Image (cartoon, coloured by chain):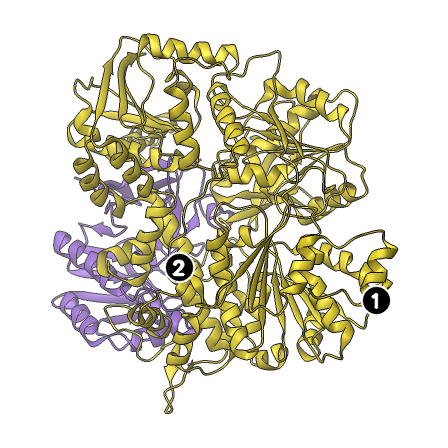
Chain colours: A purple, B yellow
């Protein structure tokens, strides 16, 4: 099994190697920072036309994870779209694909700084949501027992840095799930200061691998 | 014969000069549409190029721009401006001369567009930028001549292709434009001439007297060169002696890292405190300018340098050139030697310093090639399409264009004369829509077609971003290095090198040892450090591959019964190899297998140059992995690849069979890091990735993502995309260099000599000391990460958190 099982704030969690988080006890799958429509937004704003395949790539990954975990609820933890226009101009077949993924599930869009408003794509729209003892929101706050995204954390042991989950005994920050996303190194002050001395990074890739943060 | 006008005759006479024959020839043929002069440095080449312009401008009133001078270096443009001012002032000619480079002020640039000088000195990139303005027709109206200096250097890179594309534009704006190229000695003048001329115009070539043959020798030292390495530290006392004996010495190195290490060691031994400076492309501009100024005033006895000093800036009285490390390429060596002794009739004096035992052989081979005037070089492929894409975007910035006209114009560029209409349309489509199989950008096309079939930018504001990204120079991502608390940068290091540093590490930059402190806003902060030896001695640098011709010379040398031309230590070494194993032969691949330190080794001598031998290493280890032979790693040099693994290989011959190798290559190529690097280069030039953004990255928060992701996405969803095709073609020629592997395969025709031994062989010995060992990736690397992570978890006792 390539996923990593761990305990966060008394909740059993499974970090999938793709960067999704599964909470089996609550039947929840959580993904963060999909940034769907990024290539469309870049073309619109700068004229540079990146390969327009990041939506396919990201949804493909999500479909596989949903099929593997079969959750009752899916939480998209903000910045699901690169901006609200990008959400609006999603291709028809991509909208249909999303609708297929949503079928039979409780789907929650948490609002992010890129997509701060309701989107016309099914599911409910929330600024945050609490499940059991855990609160899910886009950007970390001082409040604890919290799962957030936003920072796109990456970590490096040997070789290249990889997107990574970061967590200590109080908060967990998710890696970016979208195909076209950069990242912030785990040792960057803005990110590191959110965590205590005993912090674990779970590296994504072929296999989810935990490693303590220095 | 066109006589010099009296004013000019008097001026020549007042200087005590007679016009050189090649200067006269240039004057006689001044009306030719294209003309190329080949002359050694110091042969009055620049004056030969400008003389017709000066005479034309002296004789009659000319409004606006008359002559455009383009050189590969900003410094060269400034240098020429200084030199031209003398005749113009002394003859009181009514000529305004200005330069325009990345360093020219904004107001000056604006003024130049409104009111161009008679002679404008610039670089290919600044010229391309000029052609992107809406007022380009006004700027270039009436342009008569363009002088391309150091055209041999430009012709080797995409900068030359960009320049020639810009020239095709200028020719349309100024139909009377005549083209002049100035070149150092090259192996194939006709090839460069045909790129300079408007196709299919002819281009006359004028050869100046090349002067006497250089006085060039190998530096013989008391101490023997080491078995491996590139530092040439052993030769430092001998080099210092030579510096003392001469007025000014240029000490050339093949890489920046080697130059830094040598300079550091030179200073440790420089007990007489001779003034010695260092100059290379990674140093800050201030530092380079300081060295250049000291050089011009003759304050320096020696300069340790790299290719950044290759080109024809006049450094005054250089009387000795030292080349440290084998020159790898005879043409480059000859051009470097030309830096010494600018007096027209004195021979240049040069010394070669082999850095290790094998380089002794290479140096002797190179010396013979110089004596026989046997220059090397690889024929260039057709004009690169990423540069063409950029040219199309630049054209669009200047205003609406007609695709048919643009295509015809591009076909007049020598390198693009065979460009098919379909290939051109591919590039145009890429610029307009992105060129994807999935037509996703109908709403946001970059270029639109208007009602009258003209192409134009959808959003005119895009012009600013396109202009900011003009250029084809492939700078790897570099980070500035500065002292903590000090604003002035010391220089630059590659991002990949910076990523390997941890606080406390020491490294060399600008000749001093510094300590890495932290990374702050994309700048590497360091502190001063008194250590004599840096912990990390080197940062990465491009390594040149040995030219095919030089490799063949070495193979011919191996074939000799004995080697009277080699120093005794090196001849003995080759003799031992012949006695214990075999010397490699030109028409066979020698493969040695032997155990060493509980690993089984395979050493294959292919003589295909460093890049190709590296590719060979990847292919062979990939096949070994498939055969469960557990390869652990390999290292490659210009002449051989050494592979080690856990299992003995009894019959290595199938690993090197041409058919296997070609098949393996196909599978290997797609996921390769070299491909990603090549893709990044091509995609940046073609305008898919922006190098410069209107607002530079300010915070450490990374908004960008790696171009590797784009490469992976394209190979998955759109493998036939234009950028993927360009990447493939370029990698074949460049870093992957499969062309050289093909050359090796056809040369040896599957004939493999396997020699099985019980110990390391003399010729393979240096391979064990070579830097740049590559661990075999794949399952092994994931396992390594996992093991290390588990150990760290255990150590931190947080496994249960």
Query: Same subunit under labels 1 and 2?
Result: yes
Q: Residue at position x 78%, y 72% from top?
A: B58
Q: Residue at position x 68%, y 69% from top?
A: B106
Q: Which mark is residue B384?
A: 2
Image coordinates for residue B166, horizontal then vertical, percent:
52, 68
Image coordinates for residue B729, horizontal then vertical, percent:
32, 53
The answer for which chain carries disc 2 is B
Query: Is B652 on the left or on the right of A76, as rendered?
Result: left
Q: Quadrant of residue B663?
A: top left
How packed mark 1 is, by other alpha carbons closer than 10 Å (few <14, some 14-19, many 20 or more), is some
Image coordinates for residue B519, horizontal then vertical, percent:
56, 44
As helix, strand or loop, the secondary structure at mark 1 comes to: helix
Q: Residue at position x 38%, y 17% from top?
A: B763
Which residue is outermost to the bottom? Answer: B451
Q: Is residue B498 above or below residue B245?
A: below
Report the front residue among B772 and B80: B80
Sequence order check, earlier mark of 1 and 2: 1
Q: Which residue is mark 1?
A: B7
């Amino acid at each position: 099994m390539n996923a990593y099982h761990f305990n966060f704030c008394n909740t059993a969690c499974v970090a999938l190697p793709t960067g999704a988080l599964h909470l089996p006890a609550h039947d929840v799958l959580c993904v963060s920072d999909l940034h769907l429509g990024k290539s469309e937004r870049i073309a619109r704003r700068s004229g540079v036309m990146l390969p327009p395949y990041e939506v396919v790539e990201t949804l493909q990954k999500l479909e596989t994870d949903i099929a593997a975990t079969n959750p009752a609820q899916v939480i998209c933890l903000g910045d699901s779209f690169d901006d609200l226009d990008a959400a609006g101009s999603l291709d028809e077949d991509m909208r249909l694909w999303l609708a297929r993924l949503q079928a039979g599930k409780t789907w929650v869009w948490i609002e992010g700084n890129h997509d701060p408003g309701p989107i016309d794509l099914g599911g409910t729209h929330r600024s945050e949501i609490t499940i059991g003892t855990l609160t899910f929101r886009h950007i970390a706050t001082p409040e604890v027992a919290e799962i957030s995204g936003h920072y796109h954390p990456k970590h490096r042991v040997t070789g290249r840095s990889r997107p990574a989950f970061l967590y200590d005994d109080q908060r967990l920050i998710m890696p970016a799930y979208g195909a076209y996303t950069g990242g912030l190194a785990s040792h960057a002050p803005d990110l590191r200061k959110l965590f205590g001395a005993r912090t674990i990074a779970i590296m994504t890739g072929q296999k989810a691998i935990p490693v303590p943060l220095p | 014969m066109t006589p010099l006008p009296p004013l000019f005759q008097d001026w020549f006479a007042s200087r005590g000069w007679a016009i050189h024959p090649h200067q006269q020839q240039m004057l006689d043929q001044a009306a030719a549409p294209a003309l190329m002069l080949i002359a050694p440095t110091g042969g009055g080449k620049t004056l030969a190029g400008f003389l017709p312009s000066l005479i034309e401008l002296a004789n009659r009133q000319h409004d606006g721009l008359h002559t455009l001078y383009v050189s590969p270096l900003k410094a060269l443009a400034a240098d020429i401006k200084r030199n031209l001012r003398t005749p113009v002032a002394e003859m009181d000619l009514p000529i305004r001369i200005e330069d325009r480079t990345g360093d020219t002020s904004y107001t000056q640039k604006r003024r130049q567009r409104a009111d161009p000088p008679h002679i404008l000195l610039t670089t290919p990139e600044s010229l391309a930028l000029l052609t992107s303005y809406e007022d380009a027709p006004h700027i270039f109206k009436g342009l008569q001549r363009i002088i391309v200096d150091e055209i041999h250097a430009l012709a080797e890179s995409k900068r030359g292709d960009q320049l020639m594309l810009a020239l095709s534009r200028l020719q349309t704006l100024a139909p009377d434009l005549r083209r002049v190229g100035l070149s150092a000695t090259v192996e194939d003048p006709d090839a460069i001439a045909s790129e300079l001329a408007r196709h299919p115009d002819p281009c006359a070539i004028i050869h100046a007297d090349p002067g006497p043959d250089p006085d060039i020798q190998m530096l013989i030292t008391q101490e023997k060169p080491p078995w491996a390495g590139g530092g040439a530290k052993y030769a430092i006392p001998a080099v210092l002696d030579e510096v003392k004996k001469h007025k000014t010495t240029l000490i050339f190195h093949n890489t920046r890292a080697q130059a830094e290490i040598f300079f550091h060691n030179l200073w440790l031994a420089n007990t007489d405190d001779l003034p010695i400076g260092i100059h290379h492309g990674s140093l800050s501009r201030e530092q380079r300018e300081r060295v250049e100024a000291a050089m011009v005033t003759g304050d320096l006895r020696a300069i340790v340098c790299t290719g950044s000093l290759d080109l024809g800036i006049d450094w005054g009285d250089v009387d000795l050139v030292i080349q440290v490390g084998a020159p790898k390429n005879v043409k480059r060596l000859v051009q470097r030697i030309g830096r010494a002794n600018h007096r027209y009739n004195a021979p240049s004096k040069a010394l070669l310093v082999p850095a290790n035992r094998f380089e002794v052989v290479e140096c002797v081979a190179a010396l013979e090639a110089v004596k026989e005037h046997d220059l090397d070089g690889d024929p260039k492929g057709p004009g690169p399409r990423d540069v063409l894409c950029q040219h199309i975007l630049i054209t669009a910035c200047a205003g609406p264009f007609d695709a048919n006209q643009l295509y015809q114009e591009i076909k007049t560029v020598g390198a693009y004369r065979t460009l098919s209409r379909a290939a051109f349309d591919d590039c145009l489509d890429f610029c307009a829509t992105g060129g994807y199989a999935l037509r996703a950008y109908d709403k946001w096309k970059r270029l639109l077609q208007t009602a009258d079939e003209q192409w134009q930018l959808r959003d005119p504001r895009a012009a600013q971003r396109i202009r900011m990204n003009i250029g084809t120079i492939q700078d790897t991502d570099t980070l500035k290095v500065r002292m903590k608390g000090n604003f002035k940068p010391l220089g630059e290091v590659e991002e990949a090198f910076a990523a390997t540093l941890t606080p406390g590490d020491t490294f060399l930059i600008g000749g001093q040892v510094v300590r890495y402190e932290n990374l702050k806003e994309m700048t590497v902060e360091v502190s001063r450090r008194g250590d004599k030896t840096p912990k990390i001695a080197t940062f990465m640098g491009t390594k040149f591959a040995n030219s095919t011709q030089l490799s063949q010379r070495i193979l011919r040398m191996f074939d000799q019964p004995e080697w009277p031309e080699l120093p005794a230590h090196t001849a003995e070494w080759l003799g031992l190899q012949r006695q214990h194993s075999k010397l490699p032969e030109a028409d066979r691949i020698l493969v040695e297998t032997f155990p060493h330190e509980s690993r089984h080794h395979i050493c294959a001598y292919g003589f295909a140059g460093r890049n190709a031998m590296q590719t060979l290493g990847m292919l062979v280890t990939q096949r070994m992995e498939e055969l469960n032979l557990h390869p652990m790693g390999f290292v490659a040099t210009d002449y051989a690849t050494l592979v080690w693994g856990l299992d003995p290989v009894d019959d290595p011959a199938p690993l090197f069979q041409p058919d296997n190798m070609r098949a393996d290559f196909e599978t290997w190529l797609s996921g390769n890091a070299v491909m990603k690097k090549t893709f990044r280069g091509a995609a940046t030039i073609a305008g898919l990735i922006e190098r410069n953004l209107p607002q530079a990255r300010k915070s450490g928060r990374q908004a960008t993502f790696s171009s590797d992701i784009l490469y992976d996405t394209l190979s998955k969803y759109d493998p036939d995309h234009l950028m993927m095709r360009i990447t493939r073609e370029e990698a074949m020629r460049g870093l992957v260099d499969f062309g050289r592997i093909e050359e090796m395969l056809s040369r040896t025709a599957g004939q493999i000599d396997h020699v099985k031994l019980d110990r390391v062989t003399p010729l393979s010995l240096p391979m064990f000391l070579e830097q740049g060992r590559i661990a075999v990736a794949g399952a092994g690397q994931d396992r390594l990460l996992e093991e290390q992570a588990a150990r760290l978890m255990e150590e931190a006792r947080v496994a249960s958190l």
